[in-house]
Amino acid sequence: MSTVFDKTDKGREEIATRKYHVASRLRTLLVMVDGKHSAEDLLHKVAGIGLTADNLNELLEQGFIQKAAEPVVADTAIPVPAAVPAAMTTATEAPATTPAANSAGGTPSSVLAEGQSQFEAIYRFYTETIKSTIGLRGYGLQLKVEKASSIDEFRQIRQAYLEGVLKAQGPEMARSLRERLDQLLYLNETAPPMTTIIGISGING
């Protein structure tokens, strides 16, 4: 099953707002659909929590995911307008120059689902991703999550969590989950530098 899927607008809306109340296990699979990894790779990663191709088809049928568009290679170059206003070029390129530090912030309304507390959001994030990316090896980490009673205690789990994801899934997954985790852990604050994470400097942005 080498098909590559990506989230639809509906799927992205569910991730951001939980509007459609997708079941927790199914939502874990939806989170991992990224338009890059094949269905086979995704199912291998979530096999430990009982998700199968039927669950992927369920997301497809409900309109949360779609087959990723394949790159189109044109026979001839597409003509470029002779004159492009400098202001337009600057505006187009501006997002790429946004400081990376901002990615770890964000307003509560843009990071948390409506009616969801920061504590609840972090708890759900840890619980869902430990199961889906680390599996049984994350049992001890999950116990720490269950015992945590404050945001500060969740922050203390961050290093062990990122190291666990790195070992289980590699730097790409660790980098992706780190960004989302830091948004939840720190909201409008600045996340600590990655140099504090021993031995995983490879996931620096």
Image: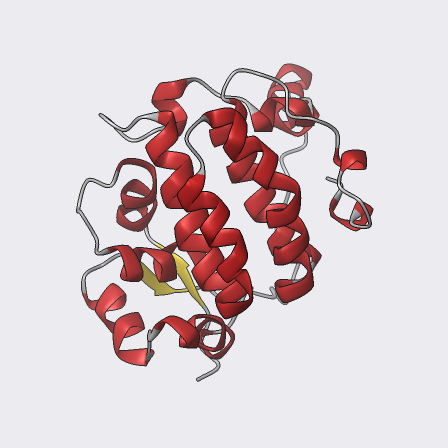
Q: Is residue 52 above or below residue 8?
A: below
Q: Quadrant of the N terminus?
A: bottom left
Name the residue nearer the viewer: 162 or 74: 162
- Residue sitting at the far bottom: 1
Q: Quadrant of the C terminus?
A: top right
Q: Residue at x 49, y 69 (%)?
A: 136
Q: Is residue 8 above or below residue 145?
A: below
Name the residue nearer the viewer: 172 or 92: 172
**Colour convention of the picture:** secondary structure
Q: Residue at x 49, y 61 (%)?
A: 139
Q: Position of residue 112 (x, y in %)?
A: 35, 28
- Residue sitting at the far front: 147
**Residue 84 visible in this rendered orientation of the protein:** no
In this picture, residue 197 sits left or right of residue 51: right
Quarter assignment of residue 194: top right
Name the residue nearer the viewer: 93 or 188: 188
Q: Position of residue 52 (x, y in %)?
A: 33, 78
Quarter assignment of residue 99: top right
**Residue 121 visible in this rendered orientation of the protein:** yes
Q: Position of residue 89 (x, y in %)?
A: 65, 24
In this picture, residue 147 sits left or right of residue 191: left
Give the tally of numbered discs: 0
Q: Residue at x 69, y 18 (%)?
A: 86
Q: Residue at x 55, y 67 (%)?
A: 137
Q: Is residue 55 above or below residue 12?
A: below
Q: Position of residue 192 (x, y in %)?
A: 70, 26
